[in-house]
Image (spheres, rainbow, N blue to C red):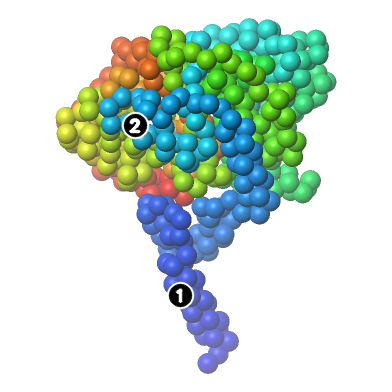
Amino acid sequence: MDVASLVASTLLVVEYVVKVAAVGTVPEGRNPGSSSAWLMAIFFIPVVGLPLYWMIGSPFVTGRRHDLQNEANRLLIEHTMAMPGVPDGAAPGPGLTTLPRMNRTLTGIPVVVGSDEGTYGDTAAAFKAMAEAIDRAERFVHVEFYIASWDDVTDPVFSALVAARARGVEVRFLMDHLGSRAYDGFAALQRRLTEADIDWRLMMPIQPFRGRWRRPDLRNHRKLLVVDGTRAFVGSHNLIAPSYGSERNARVGRLWKDLSIQVGGEVVTAIEAVFATDWYAETGERLAPDLFFAGHESHPPGGRYDAMQLVPSGPGFPTEPNLRMFTHLVHQAVRSVSITSPYFVPDEALLTAITSAAYRGVRVDVFVGEKADQFVVGHAQRSYYTTLLQAGVHLHLYPAPAVLHAKYMTVDGHVGVIGSSNMDYRSYALNYEVMLLGFGGDLVDRLLASDAEYLAVSRELTLDEWRTQPLRARYVDNVCRLASSLM
């Protein structure tokens, strides 16, 4: 046998060994859709698929980040276990008595009472409310956003932070490295924060020349702000103008449409605990509970007071608490389900729950953007439309060029969730997210009011219209559906 034949035979044997090994290792701890996508990548393009899987394919967090996250989770439970919580008998409606218990088992956070201090669908109004809350700060402000950019629209927030620090308020600031660095002024933002004596850190930094390397596919996607442990904001707003730094976007009206909520009361302690765990993960500094967790007057649910439960999720929570909560809620619906998500790529369990709800007579409304801002996820989302429409789901397309970016859900008009999590594989497993569950007060009414606003400008997609899509479009949708499981 000549050298060329020997090399070819060796490579063939190695290829088959790799493929056989992949069949028995890739599916471990992974959902079937993601497993199939990775196996196809390894089988058909092993030169690309295998190195990519080696770099970002594991569903588990390992190494130093794994150890830090385990310690951070322990601190999260430690910070929240003393919270009295709402009695176990309290539930967000018939059939949902076990949901708060499941969430606490998975995250350590109990149901408590929080006050709804306002929802904000307008970005300028959201930042104005944040700035006003910061202006009232006396002890500390903790800020955490996936994307942060100091521009004309966010200036009220940053100026309030600078002023707060100048009067002696402690200000800690977290922003995701890859999420923020893509926007103009990133270096200037860091310099301005330093000049203002604000203690800032990058989340999940990728700086190999400084010895700081993280898997690039794992990001911290949370958006939250806490003031003095008494007021907090969570939702879908990133700390950036609704045009996302693009003059062209602003000119053509391509603006991001978000929804965030301001809360007070006991639930702020849970939000502060999540910030404290992320701060510890990036700095190793533990924030003392007696300094940063305020006491709160107890109120029964009703009116602006809701029973609330914070549900963090991400690579540090391999049980995927957000996905389990979404699926559980839909399975228990008896009258209505409304879902708003910019990236709607449900896994098999959630898709089955949604279509089953529609088949059993539950009114299911899904609000998505007419045109997504991300090519792959946008086309992957479209690949589910046929299944949804055939089941009787009402699919509402928010008109382009605006980008519908709000992330919330209501069930039966008495329970809702709002936060940072999309309904796609990335938000289930790869992004650190946070969602707020609420029931027993006015929160759901506020979310339903947002539904009415979206409904007034959206158009409903029909099955007959969707069936006219050309074959090439359906082909692209299906390819992107497969690829989305790798991202």
Position of 120 relative to 279 (above/below): above
What is the CA distance from the residue labelled 1 to the residue labelled 2?
Answer: 50 Å
**x, y percent for residue 5:** 52, 85
Q: At numbered mark 2, what does the secondary structure look like: helix, strand or loop? A: loop
Query: Which image quarter: residue 467?
Result: top left
Q: Residues within 10 Å of mark 2 (few under 14, many from 20)?
A: some
Identify the residue position indicated by label 2 in the image: 97
Q: Nearer the viewer, residue 402 or 88?
A: 88
Residue at image position (61%, 15%) is 230
Identity, as a three-letter code, of the amino acid under mark 1: Tyr
Residue at screen point 53% across, 81% down: 10
Q: How many marks?
A: 2
Is label 1 in a helix, a strand or a loop? helix
Residue 38 in picture, x, y percent from top left: 44, 57
Q: Label for residue 420? A: none
Residue 484 visible, this angle: yes
Residue at (34%, 31%) from the top-left corner?
A: 97
Task: Using residue 459 as the reference point, say whether residue 152 is left or right of it.
Answer: right
Q: Judge whether 34 appears above or below 405 on screen.
A: below
Q: Is residue 210 above or below residue 389?
A: below
Q: Which mark is residue 16?
A: 1
| Residue, far bottom | 1
- Which mark lies nearer to you, 1 or 2? 2
Towards the viewer: 477 or 30: 30
Hey, what amino acid is under mark 2? Thr
Q: Of residues 210 and 109, which is closer to you in this image?
A: 109
* Residue pictured at 44% horizontal, 14% vertical: 300
Q: Position of residue 439 (x, y in %)?
A: 39, 20
